[in-house]
Amino acid sequence: MMRILLKILLFPITLSLTIILLFSEFICLFGTMFLSILALLLFVLALGGTMIILKDMQDGLRAMVLAYLISPFGIPILASWLLGKIGQVNERLKAI
Protein backbone atom coordinates (compact mmCIF):
# COMPACT_ATOMS: atom_id res chain seq x y z
CA MET A 1 0.00 0.00 0.00
CA MET A 2 2.79 2.38 0.92
CA ARG A 3 4.68 1.59 -2.27
CA ILE A 4 1.66 2.45 -4.43
CA LEU A 5 1.23 5.76 -2.60
CA LEU A 6 4.93 6.54 -3.09
CA LYS A 7 4.64 5.75 -6.82
CA ILE A 8 1.66 8.09 -7.12
CA LEU A 9 3.58 10.86 -5.35
CA LEU A 10 6.71 10.36 -7.49
CA PHE A 11 4.85 10.16 -10.82
CA PRO A 12 4.86 13.94 -11.55
CA ILE A 13 8.56 14.12 -10.71
CA THR A 14 9.50 11.21 -12.98
CA LEU A 15 7.28 12.54 -15.77
CA SER A 16 8.81 16.01 -15.67
CA LEU A 17 12.31 14.55 -15.34
CA THR A 18 11.72 12.36 -18.40
CA ILE A 19 10.49 15.30 -20.48
CA ILE A 20 13.41 17.50 -19.39
CA LEU A 21 15.85 14.68 -20.11
CA LEU A 22 14.51 14.08 -23.62
CA PHE A 23 14.58 17.80 -24.42
CA SER A 24 18.12 18.11 -23.06
CA GLU A 25 19.32 15.14 -25.13
CA PHE A 26 17.82 16.74 -28.24
CA ILE A 27 19.56 20.05 -27.52
CA CYS A 28 22.82 18.24 -26.72
CA LEU A 29 22.72 16.41 -30.05
CA PHE A 30 22.33 19.54 -32.15
CA GLY A 31 24.69 21.51 -29.92
CA THR A 32 27.38 18.89 -30.43
CA MET A 33 26.97 19.08 -34.20
CA PHE A 34 27.21 22.87 -34.14
CA LEU A 35 30.21 22.87 -31.80
CA SER A 36 31.98 20.27 -33.97
CA ILE A 37 31.78 22.57 -36.98
CA LEU A 38 32.88 25.53 -34.86
CA ALA A 39 35.80 23.50 -33.42
CA LEU A 40 36.99 22.60 -36.92
CA LEU A 41 36.90 26.24 -38.01
CA LEU A 42 38.68 27.37 -34.85
CA PHE A 43 41.35 24.70 -35.24
CA VAL A 44 42.00 25.68 -38.85
CA LEU A 45 42.16 29.34 -37.84
CA ALA A 46 44.55 28.57 -34.99
CA LEU A 47 46.81 26.37 -37.05
CA GLY A 48 46.76 28.30 -40.30
CA GLY A 49 46.24 31.88 -39.30
CA THR A 50 47.83 32.33 -35.94
CA MET A 51 50.65 29.78 -35.78
CA ILE A 52 51.89 29.67 -39.38
CA ILE A 53 51.18 33.11 -40.82
CA LEU A 54 51.54 35.33 -37.73
CA LYS A 55 54.12 33.13 -35.93
CA ASP A 56 52.28 33.62 -32.62
CA MET A 57 52.55 30.28 -30.84
CA GLN A 58 50.91 31.26 -27.55
CA ASP A 59 47.66 32.53 -29.08
CA GLY A 60 47.65 29.61 -31.50
CA LEU A 61 47.90 27.10 -28.66
CA ARG A 62 45.15 28.89 -26.75
CA ALA A 63 42.87 28.67 -29.77
CA MET A 64 43.73 24.98 -30.20
CA VAL A 65 42.87 24.24 -26.56
CA LEU A 66 39.60 26.12 -26.99
CA ALA A 67 38.90 24.13 -30.16
CA TYR A 68 39.50 20.90 -28.21
CA LEU A 69 37.14 21.97 -25.42
CA ILE A 70 34.26 22.66 -27.80
CA SER A 71 34.97 19.59 -29.91
CA PRO A 72 32.94 16.40 -29.27
CA PHE A 73 35.64 15.28 -26.83
CA GLY A 74 35.38 18.28 -24.51
CA ILE A 75 32.29 19.94 -23.09
CA PRO A 76 29.71 17.87 -25.06
CA ILE A 77 31.01 14.62 -23.57
CA LEU A 78 30.66 16.16 -20.12
CA ALA A 79 27.06 17.08 -20.94
CA SER A 80 26.39 13.54 -22.18
CA TRP A 81 27.82 12.10 -18.98
CA LEU A 82 25.64 14.40 -16.88
CA LEU A 83 22.53 13.48 -18.89
CA GLY A 84 23.38 9.81 -18.35
CA LYS A 85 23.56 10.31 -14.58
CA ILE A 86 20.22 12.16 -14.58
CA GLY A 87 18.76 9.29 -16.63
CA GLN A 88 19.99 6.80 -14.03
CA VAL A 89 18.32 8.79 -11.25
CA ASN A 90 15.11 8.87 -13.29
CA GLU A 91 15.21 5.10 -13.79
CA ARG A 92 15.79 4.52 -10.07
CA LEU A 93 12.81 6.71 -9.25
CA LYS A 94 10.69 4.73 -11.72
CA ALA A 95 11.82 1.43 -10.19
CA ILE A 96 10.39 2.32 -6.77
Image (tube, rainbow, N blue to C red):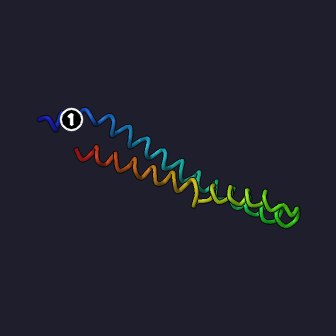
**The residue positioned farthest toward the left in the image shown:** 1
- Residue at image position (46%, 50%) is 82
Q: Nearer the viewer, residue 65 or 23?
A: 65
Residue 7, position as x, y percentages in the image: 22, 37
Does 69 appear above or below 48?
A: above
Furthest residue to the front? 58
The residue lying at 88 percent from left, 65 percent from top is 53
Residue drawn at the location 78% of the way across and 59% of the way down: 58
User: In the rendering, at what x and y percent does residue 68 appear?
Assistant: 64, 60
- Horizontal and vertical percent position of residue 22: 44, 47
In the rendered structure, the answer to whether residue 81 lies left or right of residue 67 reads left
Indicate the secondary structure of the residue bearing disc 1. Answer: helix
Q: Is residue 20 left or right of residue 38?
A: left
Q: Position of residue 61 (x, y in %)?
A: 74, 61
Q: Is residue 20 left or right of residue 88?
A: right
Q: Is residue 14 above or below residue 79?
A: above
Vertical arrangement, residue 93 with respect to residue 35, above or below: above
In percent of the image, x 55 and y 54: which residue is there?
Answer: 76
**Neighbourhood count class around disc 1 (C-alpha, 10 Å): few under 14, some 14–19, many 20 upward:** few
**Dividing the image into 4 quarters, which one contains the N terminus?**
top left
The quadrant holding residue 32 is: bottom right
Quadrant containing the C terminus is top left
- The part of the image, by quadrant, that contains residue 36 is bottom right
Q: Amino acid at mark 1?
A: Leu
Report the residue that reaches farthest toward the right: 54
**In this figure, which residue is indicated by the disc labeled 1?**
6
